[in-house]
Amino acid sequence: MSRPETHAPVIRSLLETDLYKFTMWQAMLHRHPQAQAEYRFACRNTPQYPLTELMDDLSRELDHLCALSFSAGELDYLRGLRFIKSDFIDFLRIFRFQRDFIALRADGDRLEIIIRGPQVHVMGFEIFVLAMVNELYFRRFDAEAAIEEGRRRLALKIDSLRVFARDEAPRRHPFQFFDFGLRRRFSGEWHREVLATLKTELPDVFRGTSNVLLARELDLVPIGTMAHEYLQSYQATGVRLRDHQKAALEDWVQEYRGDLGIALTDVIGMDAFLADFDLYFAKLFDGLRHDSGDPVEWGEKALAHYEQLRIDAHTKRLVFSDALDMPKALALYRHFADRTQLGFGIGTQLSNDMGLPTLNIVVKLTHVNGQPVAKLSDSPGKTMCEDQTFLAYLRQVFKVPTPVTTPLTTPLATPLATPLATPLTN
């Protein structure tokens, strides 16, 4: 491991983010443009060297990001997506990230990244920050050996899918997968090579990417709808807490009028979600996305819910996206493919399967309008909240039992004394 030589910036374009950042961004601009928000970075595992060693390089990358703006061609591409509205394009035309809204700090060997400001001006930092930290981290390893191993593993994935297509008995619904690997990729260059290879070698089953820039450059379908932060925001935007999921889903329906119809289910947990996902929403949304908990149990609950509502599950889609690799995706396909449409969003195991231990890093929404927000994941280790009192109240409101195992939450950082709306300085 060694310090890297001078490299080009990690982020080349403001399109180099996940599609759901744009879709949530537009919805929040139209529904809650005044919201103030705080996001925090966390690393859930132990890196091979302290991430604080990246601070100088990361600061330069952030300076570069804040100098970028959308080009006319990039705006034309976004305008061509039928669910993107003209006033949002006008907003993006003048948008730039503000460096004062993001700060880096060292707490011993632990890297702190705090993002705070108007939500429509800070929510876009997440994917860029994660991609930067990942690429800067892996630049200190032997890139040539890693790429060689990555190509070998990618070839094995492609071969396994060809064998699967040749030997498996046909199912009612086809196997389709897409790339969700931008935030934890080995590098931007490698990410592009992976997607170009998959497009060439597996055109019938590889159906797109969440990476908007590479979707544009490689003529792929951009994939994505909503993430946890969208539903979490509604915990602190003025609606009754018990009604926040329904309010978020209703606003999504009104914003997109039938487009982007895959709903995320695990902000309060699958059971609490289904209690709100009544016949109205079940008919309007095209399907559901799994991101925590046992995927088979989750899928069975979803199918039972559709059956109870007398909805033909063959008209709906279940999308799996929680720490998938190809064997797990194929096993889930075999289990469900004769009963409903499916999709598989594979992240790290496509964009960073290089034989190196990966980082488990996240940037999570912690506060909106000065109030704590939380994710009550179906996987206890993914539950996140800084305020234990609010977390307990949220469990009580939605009748979610406290897990027996501890710790119950992943703390993101020590709360800061600085008021929420005050810009940060480094």
Image (spheres, rainbow, N blue to C red):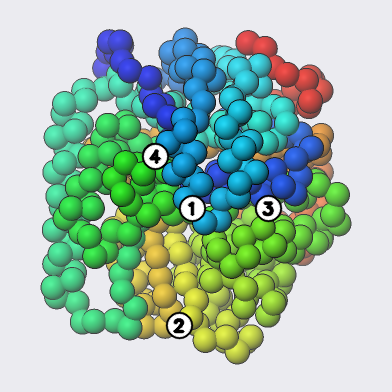
Whether residue 364 is visible here, answered yes or no, is: no
Q: On the rendered structure, is 88 left or right of 242?
A: left
Q: Quadrant of residue 248?
A: bottom right
CA separation, marks 2 and 4? Answer: 32 Å
Q: Is residue 359 above or below residue 212?
A: above
Cα distance between the residues tagged 1 and 4: 13 Å
Q: Amino acid at mark 1?
A: Leu
x then y, percent, for residue 79: 51, 47
Gap between marks 3 and 4 measured at Cα: 25 Å
Could you say which disc has been placed on residue 81 in the image? 1
- Residue 244 against residue 12 in the figure, above or below: below
- Would you name the residue on which mark 2 appears? 314
Q: Residue at x 18, y 71 (%)?
A: 165
Q: Secondary structure at mark 2?
A: helix
Query: Dot 3 corresponds to which residue?
Result: 231
Residue 56's place in the image compared with 316, above or below, is above
Image check: 12 left or right of 229?
left
Name which residue type carries label 3: Leu
Q: Earlier in the sequence, mark 3 or mark 4?
A: 4
Tell me the crowding category of disc 4: few under 14, some 14 to 19, or many 20 or more residues within 10 angstroms, Cα based: many
Instruction: Verify CB contact (< 8 Å) between mark 3 and mark 4.
Output: no
- Taking 315 as reference, is 387 above or below it? above
Percent across and percent down for residue 196 are 23, 45
Nearer the camera: disc 2 or disc 4: 4
Q: Secondary structure at mark 1?
A: loop
